[in-house]
């Protein structure tokens, strides 16, 4: 009798585990949509960060070019002033 009762409990437990684990198609679709949404969100955030990095690089490069151009203009101005004075 104990074996029969143990078998019954084991069967009921197994059935309960499988019954709880099964998801309906709607639940699975919902989970997939949530995962896809999260992946898209992460991709957009990554793209935004890459754009910010690229913009920062362009800004730094342009600042360097402006400084170089300013120095060249100053040097040229000094040369012209020296020629005019001389």
Image (spheres, rainbow, N blue to C red):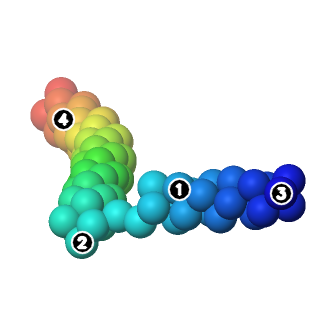
Residue named by callout 3: 1
* Left or right, 9 with reference to 40: right
Residue named by callout 1: 16
Q: Are marks 4 and 1 in contact (CB under 8 Å)?
A: no
Cα–Cα span, label 3 and label 4: 109 Å
Task: Pick whichever of labels 3 and 4 is earlier in the sequence.
Answer: 3
Residue 82 in sight from this viewpoint: no
> Few, some or many C-alpha atoms within 10 Å of disc 1 (few <14, some 14-19, many ≥20)?
few
Please state which of the two labelled residues, at mark 4 or mark 1, is closer to the viewer: 1
**Percent x, y for residue 78?**
25, 32
Count of marks placed on residues: 4
Cα–Cα span, label 4 and label 2: 77 Å
Cα–Cα span, label 4 and label 1: 89 Å
Task: Pick whichever of labels 2 and 3 is earlier in the sequence.
Answer: 3
Task: Pick whichever of labels 1 and 3 is earlier in the sequence.
Answer: 3
Question: Residue 40 occupies which quadrant of the picture?
Answer: bottom left
**Percent x, y for residue 62?**
26, 46
**Percent x, y for residue 42?**
33, 52
């Amino acid at each position: 009798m104990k074996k029969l009762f143990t078998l019954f409990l084991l069967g009921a437990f197994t059935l309960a585990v499988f019954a709880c684990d099964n998801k309906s198609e709607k639940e699975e679709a919902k989970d997939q949509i949530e995962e896809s949404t999260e992946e898209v969100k992460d991709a957009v955030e990554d793209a935004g960060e890459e754009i910010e990095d690229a913009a920062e690089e362009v800004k730094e490069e342009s600042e360097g070019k402006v400084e170089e151009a300013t120095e060249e203009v100053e040097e040229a101005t000094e040369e012209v002033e020296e020629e005019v004075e001389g």
